Every structure is written in C-alpha cells, then in structure tokens.
Image (cartoon, rainbow, N blue to C red):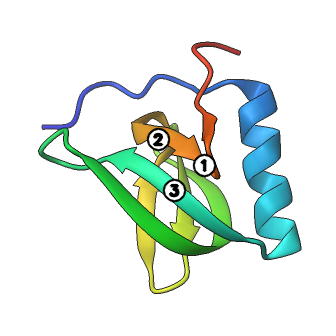
Amino acid sequence: MEKKYIPISCDFYDEIELLALRKSKCKVIFRNANNEEELIEGVISNVFSKNKEEFLEMEGDVKIRLDRLVSINGMPLPDAC
C-alpha cells in the first residue's frame, strides 16, 4: 500500500505546470514502487489531482505521483511548500 500523500512545494508544482504548458522534453527522476530511483524522458502531458493526490502524466500514459519525484531536469524536489 502506498504511503500517505505529502504535497510538494508550490513553486515546484508551478514549474511542472510550466513544463507541461511548454511541452518541454524533460528528464524526470522518481522513486518507483520498489523505492528505487528511475529515470524517464519525455514530455509532461498533464498535471492533475485525484483522491487528494497530485500526479503528472507523461506521454505514453505514464503517471507519477508528485511526492515520488526526485528531480526534473536536474532540479531537485524541495522539501516543503
């Protein structure tokens, strides 16, 4: 079972939305279900909320819960809003 969602930094969320709006190619590092870092490259196609959790969606229908992010384009995920 996934741990309780912890909201990410508001500024970082804004950066994710901007990348999605610009359709910029991104290098996203996140922690997978095994808590291992994984790298995926592509365009962020959507940022959305579901059941009080926030996600980004990459082309190819890859969805990543935002509190699983480590970094995007080398920018590390800040600790708090």
Instruction: Determine the residue positioned at 63% across, 13% down.
Output: 80
Is the residue under label 3 in contact with that under label 2 (CB below 8 Å)?
yes
Location of residue 2 with respect to 55 vertically, above or below: above
Work out whether 2 lies above or below 29. above
Task: Residue type at mark 2: give it.
Answer: Leu
Q: Cα distance, mark 2 to mark 3?
A: 8 Å
On the image, numbered disc 1 is attached to which residue? 72
Amino acid at pointer 1: Ile
Q: Give the mark nearest the N terminus, 3 or 1.
A: 3
Q: Which element is circle 2 on?
A: strand
Mark 2 touches mark 1? (CB < 8 Å): yes
What's the amino acid at mark 3?
Val
Looking at the image, is 46 positioned above or below residue 2? below
Q: Which residue is labeled 3 in the image?
A: 28
- In x, y percent, where is residue 57? 54, 67
Q: Are marks 3 and 1 in contact (CB under 8 Å)?
A: yes
Horizontal and vertical percent for residue 67? 46, 34
User: Front-most of 16 and 25?
Assistant: 25
CA distance for labels 2 and 1: 8 Å
Q: Which mark is residue 69?
A: 2
Mark sitting earlier along the chain (2/3) = 3
